[in-house]
Amino acid sequence: MARLLRGAPVAEALTGQLAARVEGLRHRGATPTLAIVRVGARAADLSYERGATKRCAAAGIAVRGLALPADCDQGELMAVIERVNADDAIHGCLLLRPLPDPLDESAACAALSPAKDVDCITGESLFGVFANRPVGFPPCTAEACVQLLDHYGHELTGASVVVVGRSLVVGRPVSMMLQARDATVTMCHARTRDLAVVCRAAEIVVVATGHPGTVGTDAVAPHQTIVDVGINWDDGLGRLCGDVAFDEVEPIVGAITPVPGGVGSITTAVLAKHVVEAAERAIG
Ligand code: NDP
């Protein structure tokens, strides 16, 4: 039976580590503050906003919800982002995406000040991840994967890691972050030949494809660690599932994240950490 790598203890440890830093900021007259910009009222956005707000409250971070109607125009959205940029009391900003049509998401993302970009939506933050420099912040989900591996004591230096998926939100940034930690990273995608063979050879496999069952029993080996980033709805089972065939894979591998309750439950804690760090950078 595999060791279950649950996200909750990681999130709690991360949140706990923030208390002293938040206190330090308060002593210096600053309350770390996150702005959450939401357009419309999609259930997924509302749910993430609730989770982020709760996590921030637990960490002593203030949250300002800035909601716009679903039919707002680009000018109104840009004005809100400009207001966030100009407000010294706001240290980080989360823009809930995808934005409804016909809003120009790229323009909205590019307009955010990189210093307040706590979830890597600007080109500057992405450059920071790829160049391993402290410009902006990495995507919360990508960092959640690294935090999880660190928390459970997985040695990254020299480890062979396969990342399945190459999106700019998860696959590519997590590959870069693991490489920055001296892992030997192979990035796979939908056109990778013999995916199962490539995966079986790795010590750690990170899966972020958006397709349930991308990694099954043929792609895993004993002693491996499997990090499943996927969040999918399984109509047949009537519940969430990941991108890994958990029930079949779990008896074979050494350690695996559950879905739900794995990587996804760490992202808001990473977000809170980024807001605190943004506040620390802002006040110098
Ligand atoms: P994208 O659709 O943007 O990217 C999917 C990637 O997976 C692509 O690079 C694609 O390859 C690759 N891929 C698709 N099918 C296969 C396959 N059969 N074999 C190998 N590679 C494949 O998805 P995201 O990166 O945005 O999200 C991935 C998953 O992570 C989703 O389930 C999503 O819900 C979840 N997610 C979870 C978050 C969390 O907080 N836990 C946050 C963000 C995402 P190619 O480039 O060749 O098309």
Image (spheres, rainbow, N blue to C red):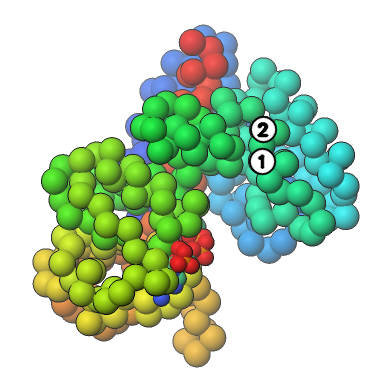
**Horizontal and vertical percent for residue 140?**
46, 45
Q: Secondary structure at mark 2?
A: loop
Question: Label 1: which residue?
Answer: 109
**Which amino acid type corresponds to the residue marked 2 in the rendered image?**
Leu
Please report contact status of discs 1 and 2: CB closer than 8 Å, yes or no: yes
Residue 59 showing in the rendered view: no
**Horizontal and vertical percent for residue 251?**
18, 79
Q: Which quarter of the picture shows residue 181?
A: top left
Nearest the eye: 204 or 131: 131
Q: CA distance from mark 1 to mark 2?
A: 6 Å
Q: Residues within 10 Å of mark 2 (few under 14, many from 20)?
A: many
Q: Residue at x 64, y 61 (%)?
A: 44
20 horizontally vs 69: left or right: left
125 horizontally vs 191: left or right: right
Residue 203 showing in the rendered view: yes
Q: Which mark is residue 271?
A: none
Q: Residue furthest bottom?
A: 236
Question: Label 2: which residue?
Answer: 112
Q: Residue at x 62, y 58 (%)?
A: 47
**Which amino acid type corresponds to the residue marked 1 in the rendered image?**
Cys
Q: Is residue 152 above or below residue 223?
A: above
